[in-house]
Image: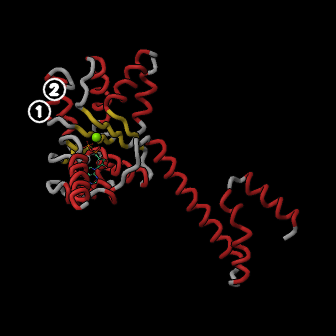
Amino acid sequence: MSDATNLLLRSNLKQLRLPTIAAEFSKLAREAAEANENYEQYLLRLTELEVAARGANAIAARIRQASFPVVKDFDTFDFSAVPALSKPKVLELARGEWLQQRGNACFIGSPGTGKTHLAIAVGLAACRQGKRVRFYTAATLVTRLEEAQKQYQLDRVLGQLDRLDLLICDELGYLSFSRVGAELLFQVFAERYERKSLLITSNLAFSDWGQVFQGERMTAALLDRLTHRCHIFEMNGESFRFRESMKNKKSRKGETDKS
Ligand code: ADP
Ligand code: MG
């Protein structure tokens, strides 16, 4: 191919926003010639690459927009450490049907049992299915809502939250909120009911949620909506972090005993 043709082709591909084809067409053309492929086969290969790259980019963007604090997946989760937890049920969440059904999920249990880890893994799986996901701790979500209200931006922020297929609210119950904060959070949760999904992690049993959502009536109204069509996972047990550090300590002790 002449240099002029090459330049023109690159310029057209840039204008058409086909960067993968631009990057690959020369190499694929050589391969196609060697393999005696026809024009259609060559074009098919090129377009396949562009389509695959776009899909991968879209998923990467969904993961970025979700703002996970760290990336944790199921492959690093040791289900044998939490025998009470049903692995098939958790993996079913990863398949995403509950999101189509606008259901909710709760991971309830003591600190260090892997609630945040699983919430992120479930969120990642949803991103890979093209869903809009956003991870917040309860405290940052409430702060965001309170700030938005002060700046007369509440409707805009509520609109953004409303567009999410899955809102993850981590660590509900570690901090209690102001009356206004609790009401705003209640509003967000209540508005999602049967429309969009919510995943909550909490160290508090449902019976103690009154501490967070001050007032029995608000708590009862919230739990009524939340727990309807909800996949509830209880994760009580020993802290994984604690167990790991004890294991490390023991093995270090073993080493010093030997020396
Ligand atoms: P929680 O949110 O319940 O307090 P985390 O999910 O933050 O607990 O877990 C604490 C740490 O221990 C994290 O680094 C997490 O990846 C790890 N962890 C917890 N449970 C497991 C597990 N069953 N398998 C592997 N890592 C785990
Ligand atoms: Mg946590």
Q: Residues within 10 Å of mark 2 (few under 14, many from 20)?
A: some
User: Which residue is more in the foreground, 193 or 35?
Assistant: 35
Q: Which residue is mark 2?
A: 210
Ligand 2 shown in quarter: top left
Residue drawn where x is 70% and y is 78% of the image? 32
Image mark for residue 207 = 1
Mark 2–mark 1 CB contact (< 8 Å)? yes
Q: Secondary structure at mark 2?
A: helix
Q: Where 99 sits versus 19, above or below? A: above
**In this image, 180 relative to 210: left or right?**
right
**In this image, 122 relative to 84: left or right?**
right
- Residue 103 in percent (x, y) is at 27, 45
- Residue 151 in percent (x, y) is at 46, 16
Residue drawn where x is 58% and y is 61% of the image? 51
**In this image, 129 relative to 5: left or right?**
left
Mark 1: which amino acid?
Ser
Asked whether residue 258 appears in the rendered view, the answer is: yes
User: Which residue is more in the foreground, 75 or 119?
Assistant: 75
Q: Where 26 sits versus 14, above or below? A: below
Q: CA distance from mark 2 to mark 1?
A: 7 Å
Q: Secondary structure at mark 1?
A: helix
User: Which residue is more in the foreground, 153 or 259?
Assistant: 259
Mark 2: which amino acid?
Gly
Residue 31 image-quadrant placement: bottom right
- Residue 161 in percent (x, y) is at 40, 33
- Residue 169 in percent (x, y) is at 31, 36
Image mark for residue 71 = none
Q: How is the image coloured?
A: secondary structure
Say if disc 2 is inside 8 Å of ligand 2.
Answer: no
Quadrant (top left, top right, bottom left, bottom right) of the C terminus: bottom left
Residue 257 image-quadrant placement: bottom left
